[in-house]
Image: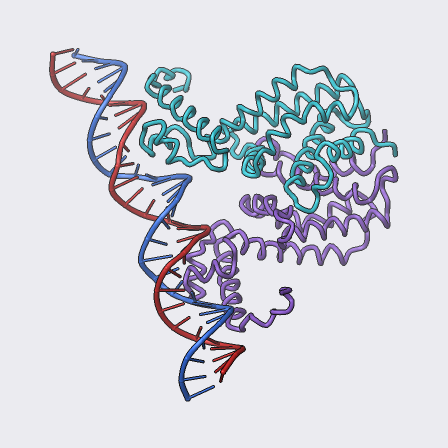
Chain colours: A purple, B cyan, C blue, D red
Amino acid sequence: MPKQAMAKAVQQRTLKTRAKLLDAAQAVISESGYEAMRVEEVVLRAGVAKGTFFSHFKDKDALMDQLIGAEIDRHLDGIEALDAPTSIAEMVEAMLPMITFMTCERYVFDLILRHSGAAANADIGPIAMTFGRHAEVVTKWLWEKPFRKDISAELQAEGVQAFMVQAISLMFCALHNSVTPRERLETYLSAWLMPTA
Amino acid sequence: MPKQAMAKAVQQRTLKTRAKLLDAAQAVISESGYEAMRVEEVVLRAGVAKGTFFSHFKDKDALMDQLIGAEIDRHLDGIEALDAPTSIAEMVEAMLPMITFMTCERYVFDLILRHSGAAANADIGPIAMTFGRHAEVVTKWLWEKPFRKDISAELQAEGVQAFMVQAISLMFCALHNSVTPRERLETYLSAWLMPTA
DNA sequence: ATTTTTAATTGACCGCGGTCATTTTTGTGT
DNA sequence: ACACAAAAATGACCGCGGTCAATTAAAAAT
């Protein structure tokens, strides 16, 4: 039997509970940050039992995936509303708010990295979706305003993501944080998108 | 008082115990893989108490850092013995054994990523060291046999690492594993090191 | 209305990483 | 030899994510 056919099975009680859990989690995070979030604290505030949490979310990471994914999506909305950047500096500028969020906590960045690719073929999580979306946006930019013509816009976009991750990673590295992420990313993307040899 | 002056303070008992712990850990890993390693199992085999483990290693990750770092170092020894590659294919070929190890388990790759940058200024862990070493080796290659001349060998090497990480990440992504890591990395590095526009 | 089926919730329980006051061992000064 | 101080080892204990058999509430069948 196809899943679609039995979509009726979900009760509104379920939606209420899930909303309570999401709200409670968001509240905790707003107060104390992502890393400090405890499942026990969330269920306490939501007024449900611990087991209920795990019948709504596969594990703690799944909740984080949703919340963080939603936040990134909000930033992507802003990015998507922009015109295609005409310079590297503009491109970096456009991506900076999203990057700032991604690096607000070490914990957040690690989680994003872990979820940036879909683990199983079926469950492409919210964060993995945002990476797909980001690649699309950048691809569109590069399609409209091409920097390099020897390789496809898709490949260029993949490189942009790779360098974005690299630039962010080095932010958490005590050895390499003398330069700002903006500067570093500009250096990378100039070399990647505007090679002169 | 400088640390050097009081180096005497370590007893042989300490070295014995640490060796026992490392051996036990390696044994467990050889049998069941990295992910399956449990601190309780290790201390049981080593014949010491649980607390002893944590007086030798800050946490479980620190042990993993050492073991995995040592393994990567072994691969780097092999890489370093090679001549500077004259083509992208050769370069990828040289790095492939190391990459294969890094991707032997999802858990291993995640841990490597988390430790690839030094967290605090003081403690540059074994894995972070290997990333530095790898960058040096690639820089030397690019110095001897330059691909691009518009950017420094160091920057080229940073890009190689960024693309290596990207290629590996996509291996664990169910959506993008139709192409082999070798192929993907060759595509990336060709575009990065031999741009034609 | 009443039974039956199915979905949702519960909380005691477990696994495992990590801590710390206490005890044991080792090296040192007398 | 002995006392004493410093280092190392111990294991009971804790925090927290995650499980599952049992219970309760909701929808469907009668």
- Answer above or below: position of B72 versus C1: above
Question: Which residue: 54% across, 38% down?
Answer: B107
Question: Which residue: 50% across, 72% down?
Answer: A13
Q: Is residue B20 visible?
A: yes
Residue B69 is situated, as x and y percent measured from the top left of the image, at 54, 26
Q: Quadrant of residue B97?
A: top right
Q: Quadrant of residue B182?
A: top right
Question: Which residue: 77% across, 26% down?
Answer: B88
Question: Which residue: 53% across, 67% down?
Answer: A19
Q: Quadrant of residue B173?
A: top right
Residue A164 is situated, as x and y percent measured from the top left of the image, at 69, 41
Residue B137 is situated, as x and y percent measured from the top left of the image, at 67, 20
Q: Is residue A82 rendered to the left or right of residue A13?
A: right
Residue A91 is situated, as x and y percent measured from the top left of the image, at 77, 46
Q: Is residue A152 rendered to the left or right of residue A128?
A: right
Q: Nearer the viewer, residue A174 or D21?
A: D21
- Answer above or below: position of A26 versus A35: below
